[in-house]
Amino acid sequence: MTTYVPTTSEERRAMLQAIGVETIGDLFRDIPARYYKPDLDLPSGRSELEVRQHLQSLAEANLDLDHHPSFLGAGAYRHFVPSVISHLVSRGEFLTSYTPYQPEASQGTLQAIYEWQSLVCELTGMDVANASVYDAATGVAEAARMACALTRRKRVLVADTVNPLYRQVLHTYAGGPEIEVATISAWQRDGDRLVRCESLAEGVDESVACLIIQQPSFLGWLERVDGLAERLAAVGALLVVAVPDAVTLGLLRPPGSYGAGIVVGEGKWTGGPLDFGGPLVGMFACRQEYVRQMPGRIVGATVDGQGRRGFVLTLATREQHIRREKATSNICTSEALVALCSTIYFCHLGKQGLRQVAELCLQKAHYAAEQIAALPGYALATTAPFFNEFVVRCPRPAGEINAMLLDQGIIGGFDLGRYSPDLADCLLLCCTELTTRQQIDRLIAALEQGGPSHG
Amino acid sequence: MDSPGIFAGRQQPEPLIFERSVPGRRAAALPPCDVPERPVRELLPESELRAELALPEVSELDIVRHFTRLSKRNFAVDSEFYPLGSCTMKYNPKLDEDVAALPGFRQLHPLQPEETVQGALRVLYELQQLLGAITGLPGVSLQPVAGAHGELTGILMVRAAHIKHGRVRKKVLIPDSAHGTNPATASMAGYEAVTVGHDRQTGELDLHDLRAKLDEDCAAIMMTVPNTLGLFERQIVEICQLAHAAGCYVYCDGANLNALVGQVRPGDLGVDLLHTNLHKTFAVPHGGGGPGGGAICVTAELEPFLPAPVAVRRGDGSYAFDHDRPESIGRVHGFHGNFNAALRSYTYILSLGKEGLYDVGATAVLNANYLMSRLRGAYQLYVDRPCMHEFVLDGRSLRDHGVRTLDLAKRLIDYGFHPPTIYFPLIVPEAIMIEPTETESRETLDAFAEAMLAIAREAREQPELLREAPHVTPVSRLDEVRAARQPDLRWRGGARRRAAETAAEARQEAAVQGRV
């Protein structure tokens, strides 16, 4: 049995004596005897060697994407992670410290969070950012609550091109305070084509706290955002923009530039592997005037008695440990270490590198899209501009295409029949800088084989 | 005794990474594009492209030095005793880190076909089972990623259960000693938080106050067991019975589960819902503020309301996600929760097993009582009776010497110890909340006790040593009032540089126009 308890039985005896009791059981007398020391239905402990072998075999029972091409995105994006990140974040001083409550003994974490907040502001074009929320999905829900608090309204609009999983979390969070969530249709199917709606601001009126959109949208295209924030502002509502992958911000204009009031983003894919979807990390940024309604920790710079710069948790009067039931959110422990991975990633990629990664994603996705569109039976579902994900109409149900691809060792795209019954013949495909031409060519060959003439 | 060695080599100010930026310097090199390229402007409208992105321009060594230096400005479990009450800063086994880094787990897409992730699904399913066995609450979801997230999930489940039974309830009862997350959670879930007092003699919930406030408008009571004074609530079984008789659920904040693990199953006591902090009891490193895990464990009655999907084992022995859960409160996380944290806790529980987990709770309580016995006399205890995994000192006696709990905490840093939790729970004036955990040796506990005793002497003889502490850190006490009144929440050099460029362009423009 493995143990991390250092105490010997001799020491235990001496400690009990110092306390003035005879047995460990004497320390547990407050627990009703009939409930004390139940026979737990648990296995016996094992050695490190045995546990390691067991976990190794479970890991090998999975089909990992280091060894299999994948065209799956749909909210989780596999990018290259430079070696420097894991080496730095696995330092015990970052890994095994707590939330930085004692600033003098936590300057490392605090300064790193300040740098993260600065990077998030720069990427999103917003004034202020917090230390992180759990993920983009809960970030969307927190943004909706924040917009309701700012506007004193209880109705939010969300485009149906926001990731359906984000929207599910939004609905869960909205249930308690009875925030009304109205989903607006951002596209329609016109025969073989999907058409973006002209304006997402239709139906906005003075009952609405905010409109939530995703850029790029869940279906990969860029939403029409010009004039949107102005139309919302005219009725006193906020524009909330969700960014599914911070890599897109290497190339695309920041949401702050088109009037977003709150921006949430997923920061996991910039600096972290897929990790089967967790931990993630939510970027959360807003305009200066909203900062006192923001959820979560915020780090600020200040000085010590000798005028030296230092960093502290600040604006804590928004938070649960001070404000209790009046807090802006209950969030406490969040995803600091994942934010640190992302911070190091942005520094490593730098001004040029992030743009280059974004361009590689863009080029590869457009190459793949063009090749697929040229296959008999397949077509791109829209002409709208897209970043690195796109919808392909298939000659057969998308689920069948994916099964056929999996038989050849390829993880296909996202079966859009799971998103809308209208799109059962559509696949959402994704490329990143990790997708090679060879993998794309393999996909094309497999799709061609599974095309109409072979069906 | 000062230990400048703790921060030796960490005294030089470390600039912001932005301040190290040199135009044109770079770390990353990207591979050439292996597909035919087209001009970006053919693929995306010009108006969608960003003009400027002021990320730092630094070398890889710049980055390594910068973040290594920053790391050295942190206290951490790997280097210091960290007796932060209510936070369970135990040792985080290195095996768990290696398991969490296996490519067969890290390189998995959360939406991959289930037949391709059988190993990962088995981990989730078995961890659900293990947590159910430990807590006596068989319905488990691993979706919540933090304690407060688990609380919100639990209270939303309570709400769903009441709605199902046609009951409209408005209030959640919360002891005055509770963590701030409890009332904040109640509000987020749409409830009014009603405070229940404690008995000053026993340090436990005031049953009279509970009886007065418990009625058919109460949806749940949120208990913390042991409570935040580190005391087991001896009336917990009765509290559960009273609550149930009023149709009210009992939520247990599992932040203090480390005292109970292996000793008692909260479900046996009558608790209906409990979150476990995987980053406390089950050894996931805290990471400076996450990622953790807030798995929610509930009774069979409440199981249908768990977030969907949950991991299940099918009749044929395969593992799957069950999405078909019509009474579920819905999803609380973008994917499956913090899988990478779940892997660590699964590894930890399998390593220790039944006997090892028993030893965790038993030794955590032994260590706390031992430390308490060493400090009794020099410090005043808020309630003087055997504690569970932590105990709370009343720091008011320090005031006689013109020093406060905050000063004591800062002085502990000079001695090389991370301070305990201070000014919490709110019911204890000048609170000092100490949780040693089971992984600390007797020598460490003794060294900490000696430091606390020495500081008590210093408070009498040289109180300025405390008031001016810490003396050895890269920065001394920081001006928190200034931080809040004049918020400086980000580096503004990028904006300044852009403004300067825009101004320069405007001047040039004006000069050109002037010539025309």
Image (spheres, coloured by chain):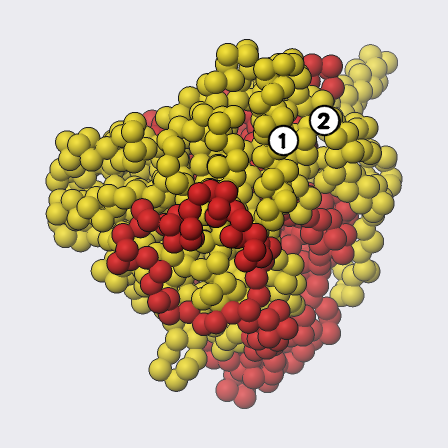
Chain colours: A red, B yellow
Q: Where is residue B457 in the image (x, y as percent from the top left)?
A: 60, 21
Q: Do labels 1 and 2 share a chain?
A: yes
Label 2 chain ID: B
Q: Position of residue B399 (x, y in %)?
A: 50, 14
Residue type at mark 1: give it: Ala
At 64% across and 35% down in the image, what residue appears? B417
Mark 1 secondary-structure assignment: helix
Is residue A440 positioned above or below B469 on the image? Answer: below
Horizontally, residue A27 falls left or right of residue B28, namely: left
Toward the viewer: A187 or A242? A242
Label 1 chain ID: B
At 52% across and 47% down in the image, what residue appears? A15
Horizontally, residue B13 falls left or right of residue A295, namely: right
State the mark number for residue B1.
2
Toward the viewer: B295 or A173? B295
Mark 2 secondary-structure assignment: loop
Residue A366 in view (yes/no): no
Q: Where is residue B199 in the image (x, y as percent from the top left)?
A: 27, 30
Residues tagged 1 and 2 counted as in contact (Cβ below 8 A): yes
Which residue position holds label 1? B451
Horizontally, residue B284 falls left or right of residue A93, namely: left
Q: In which quarter of the image is the N terminus of chain B?
A: top right
Is residue A308 positioned above or below A12 on the image? Answer: above
Which numbered disc flags the more N-terminal residue, 1 or 2? 2
Is residue A375 positioned above or below A205 on the image? Answer: below
Q: In which quarter of the image is the C terminus of chain B?
A: top right
CA neighbours of label 1 inside 10 A, class few (<14), some (14 to 19), many (20+): some
Q: Quadrant of residue A101?
A: top right
At 53% across and 22% down in the image, what residue appears? B405
